Amino acid sequence: MAYVDSYSGVEFTIVFSCPSLEYWQAHSSDTETYENLVQVLAAPLSVRENVSLFFPGGEEWLISNPDAYDTPLELNAVAARSVMLLVLSGTLQYHGIDADNSSLTQFDTLVQAAINAPASYSDLSDYDIVFFGDSVFGNYQDFASIPGIIGALTKASVHNRAIGGSSATQLTPDDKSFPSAVQRFLSEDTAEISGEKKLCFVINYGLNDYFTGYTVEQYRDGLQAGVQSLQDAYPDAEILIASSNFITAFANGTAFNNDLNEILNDYVTGAEETAAAMNVFFLNTNEALQWNPQNAACYLVDAVHPNEEGRFLFGTAIIKALDEDIFSYPVH
């Protein structure tokens, strides 16, 4: 405190520690001490004009992910970089106990729930899961990506083949569409599949088909072509089609982008119908996540793409769908 006051012209950024949920589950008696310590330190520091406080310890997407940590108390380099980038952007700010969204209240609620009713996930360490999709999957490749979350929580080997800006609709045989991505995967990249593990494909398209104005029929044709190629090559593999997520762009997905006046929900229906026709599993992401105009800002980094919390929830929704529809394994 004296140091901060001695350099009143210097801006200080203070980031509180963020032990993992694994740590708190093993040291539940320490949570009250930790909360008191943070509160004691934050109270005088928060009134200093040259101090900014940040508290990542209550972020479920971070502390629930074992792949973010070298030890239960230490973030790894990738996760630490992610936290610092968010801090520099102004995210993760500490909110005192009098705030409506108190940081310590959020932390305590999350940790106590994890202690009293720990989340459990199927052990899929004997599975390869391959992901095809657009930027919702493809723009993120680390522990906080949707495939990364699924791999961290289930121990599955995950392979992210998603491409930003891609769609299911195929215009040419060598474009970035789903059928083209499948053909490249089958011809060039099957070496990444061990052959010793069971195989599952997770597919997520629809946003760029809607944005570009491709028709739902074109979208369904693309989905069907890609799925058929995967089924022909891997007849024993399981396949899950996940619909696009809720967006706030294009009037929450209700604007018309083609001459047929089709809205985003029509593509969700198209994905469901294709899944049924191809005898594969389907996840209605909108129903699973319940994002809407009132709460979407909490889960989207922009008007389209899920933020860290949104990707964590998306990933766990896929895990739940896999558990309910495909897998039946003891939890770990």
Image (spheres, helix red, strand yellow):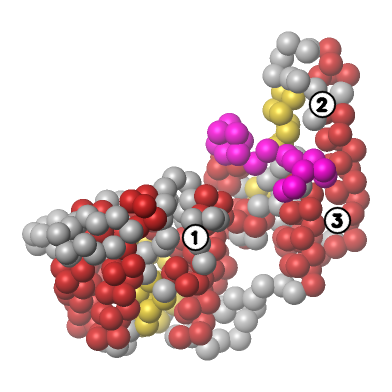
Taking the magenta stretch, the answer to whether it contains residue 90 is: yes
Q: Which residue is mark 1?
A: 292
The structure residue drawn at horizontal position 60% and vertical position 39%, both measured from the top left corner, is 91
Magenta residue span? 84-101
In the drawing, does residue 260 fall left or right of residue 266?
Answer: left
- Quadrant where the C terminus sits is bottom right
Disc 2 residue type (three-letter): Val
Q: Position of residue 169 (x, y in %)?
A: 18, 63
Q: Position of residue 194 (x, y in %)?
A: 36, 73
Query: SS for tag 1?
Result: loop
Query: SS for tag 2?
Result: loop
Q: Which residue is mark 3?
A: 31
Which tag, 1 or 2, sits closer to the chain's start?
Answer: 2
Q: Nearer the viewer, residue 279 or 196?
A: 279
Q: Is residue 137 visible?
A: yes
Q: Position of residue 317 (x, y in %)?
A: 51, 71
Q: Nearer the viewer, residue 133 or 23?
A: 133
Q: Which residue is mark 2?
A: 47
Magenta stretch: helix, strand or loop mostly = loop
In the drawing, does residue 172 fall left or right of residue 3?
Answer: left
The structure residue drawn at horizontal position 86% and vertical position 34%, both measured from the top left corner, is 43
The structure residue drawn at horizontal position 79% and vertical position 57%, both measured from the top left corner, is 108
